[in-house]
Amino acid sequence: MRIEITCANRVGILHEIMQIFGEYRINVTSGELGGDSGDKVYLAAPSMLTTQYQAIERSLLKVPGVQRVRRIALIPSERRHFELDTLLRHVADPVLSVDREGRVIAANLAAARAFGVSLDKVPGLQLQRFLPLMQVAELLRDFAVPRYGLPVGVRGRAYRMEWSPIPVEDSPGAVDSLAGAVLTLQQWDADQSAVELPRLVALWDFDLRRERCLQLQELANFRSPLLIVGERGTGKSTFAGALHYLSPVAAAGDCQRLLPRDGQMPLPSQLRGSGTLILEDLHRLSAAAQLALVRQLQDLPAQLRLVATSVSADRLEPALAQIFSTLALSLPPLRTMRPALPRFAAAMLRQHAPEAQPLQLSDDVLALMKQHDWPDNFNGLGDYLGAGVRRCVARNGDTIEAGDLPDLAVRPQLPWRDWGRGLTYREMMEQLERALLNDLVAEQPSTRELAKRLGISHTAVANKLRKYGLAKSRV
């Protein structure tokens, strides 16, 4: 039996209500507070008899603040559950929800049929089992995940997947801000489409890339052209492809990608009227080719989202730069994210062995990697780790050692040759120390924390700050 109690909102009234049920030795199995005005208490007591309810009703009405007691068929949460379950049973497309670990929490009958299992066996299964090519662990980390039009294959059938993240309300946007996701699959005839969609790749939102990933999510909701800039290997193409999946246009259109050829980038005679158009490496176009591209872009369909990549906006002709002057995203180089190198490396190693236990990196290897500047950024790091994986696997090891890796022959790109002309070694080191301390003083709230970060004594830091005129008032 289920009952609804309308009552005033006062301290202790719920305790008095539950005390009455205890006096009659009635077991309450579930309850809920709410109602349209927030003045309802819903209780479920399956073992309660009608005669017991009549006696409890009289006792409840004597409680100060209780206005009405009546029997109901379902508690509101139960009604919502049954209504949602009925709706999902009649949805022809597979729908399922997963938690942060990629385990299926619930699914409808269409999803069970698509996965080839009975409906009662779906909860608890790993999504990775049905979508082995997806980096489920990475995609479920946080908000920076694709949302629309993801091409996936389930048991030989092609689908386009819609991905709706479930945020944690008390920490939106935080690293652990995702409780799970709801997935909807729509069958898609991939054979009839000549479009090669961007490969689904996790964005690895560690360190400084975290902010860029959240910016990308925000920018995906707009329609203005977007320019993504960054050094070679920082992930410009990856972010451009992710923008398509983050944007609602992916639900109704495809992604078209163009690369420079012989310094030119002619647009196809017929472009599809909706979706995303990615123009790669605009800096590789000659000045004449960039002006020719500007004239072609004037005739683009209004429903086509324009995204471009370049090493720098300064490498674009003014007319072309004007098109991308509204929205821009700059990706940080890998050398500015040394604290996150172990996490980036671990994510890359999981890519090399998505189904097996990923290899580990020894402490010597991590120390060696942090000293390198990685001029090719993630491209260079990926090749470096790939070589180590092959050698480690060949010797049947489970940890990549320094001997498994190729030599890092590239020297740090430091400005000594031009910047240090006319200075002695001592003068150069003092200039460098002054510049370093000047930047760190603005970041650290006290000299004691600054000393802890640098690994030297507080007195040494204070002396150096006084030497360079950077002494702080807070200690």
Image (tube, rainbow, N blue to C red):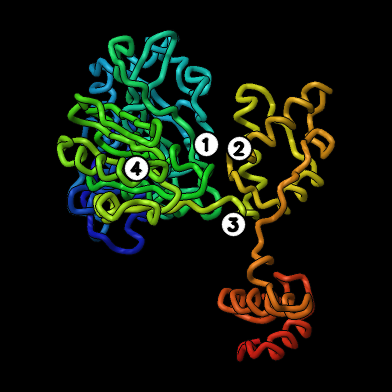
Marks 4 and 1 sit apart, C-alpha to C-alpha, by 25 Å
Q: In this view, does 359 lie to the left or right of 418?
A: right
Q: Name the residue under label 2.
A: 347
Quarter of the image where one finds residue 277: top left
Q: Which of 334 and 99 is in front in this view?
A: 334
Residue found at x 68% / y 30%: 386
User: Which amino acid lies under the numbered mark 3 shown in the image of this protein?
Assistant: Thr
Marks 4 and 2 sit apart, C-alpha to C-alpha, by 26 Å
Labels 3 and 2: the sequence-earlier one: 3
Q: In this view, does 177 lie to the left or right of 356?
A: left
Q: Is residue 439 left or right of residue 260?
A: right
Q: Mark 1 points at which residue?
A: 138
Q: In the image, is residue 338 above or below residue 300?
A: below
User: Which amino acid lies under the numbered mark 2 shown in the image of this protein?
Assistant: Ala
Viewer can see residue 429: yes
Mark nearer the viewer, 4 or 1: 4
Residue 425 point in image, percent of width and height? 78, 75
Q: Quadrant of the C terminus?
A: bottom right
Marks 1 and 2 sit apart, C-alpha to C-alpha, by 8 Å
Labels 3 and 4: the sequence-earlier one: 4
Labels 4 and 1: the sequence-earlier one: 1
Marks 3 and 2 sit apart, C-alpha to C-alpha, by 18 Å
Q: Mark 3 points at which residue?
A: 336
Under tag 2, what secondary structure? helix
**Residues at marks 4 and 1 touching, judged by CB atoms closer than 8 Å:** no
Q: Residues within 10 Å of mark 1 (few under 14, many from 20)?
A: many
